[in-house]
Amino acid sequence: MENLMTALQKFAQSEEFVDAVVSSTQAGFDGSGYSVEVFEDGTSRVLWDNQIGNRYESPGMIVRIPQLSAEEAEEGDLREVAEFYRDELAAQMLDSASA
């Protein structure tokens, strides 16, 4: 579990995280979202929630990527807003993984 949390923290600090928050927010407008799957070896991949089937059993851990609220999304360019709220969004994702 420790390696998985380390991989998740690494993802949260990457540029890919900001892009994933933007994608998840945009998908959220249609009722969907994105998740990240992290693995023991420290790697990760971003998955559209519709790609994850009910029967899929991850060899790692799957955590939902947070979305900007409607109010936050209206503040301007989604990428810039996601970067601004990055620490808060990363903490939210890490908290949900450790729950």
Image (cartoon, rainbow, N blue to C red):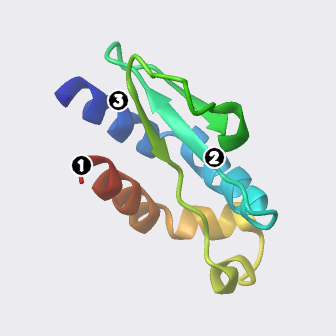
Residue 35 visible at all: yes
Residue 15 visible at all: no
Marks 3 and 2, the one that precedes in the sequence: 3
Q: Amino acid at mark 1?
A: Ser
> Which residue lies most toward the top here?
41
Query: Which one is in front in this view, the residue at disc 1 or the one at disc 3?
Result: 1
Distance between mark 3 and mark 2 Cα atoms: 17 Å
Residue at 74% x, 63% y: name it. Answer: 31
Quadrant where the C terminus sits is: bottom left
Classify 10 Å Cα crowding around label 1: few (below 14), some (14-19), many (20 and above): few
Residue of label 1: 98
Classify 10 Å Cα crowding around label 2: few (below 14), some (14-19), many (20 and above): many
Residue of label 2: 34
Marks 2 and 1, the one that precedes in the sequence: 2
Q: Secondary structure at mark 1?
A: helix
Distance between mark 1 and mark 3 Cα atoms: 13 Å
Query: Which one is in front in this view, the residue at disc 3 or the one at disc 2?
Result: 2
> Which residue lies most toward the front here?
55
Residue of label 3: 7
95 is higher (above) or lower (below) than 10:
below
Residue at 46% x, 63% y: name it. Answer: 89
Q: Amino acid at mark 2?
A: Tyr
Residue at 35% x, 29% y: name it. Answer: 7
Q: Amino acid at mark 3?
A: Ala
17 is higher (above) or lower (below) than 45:
below
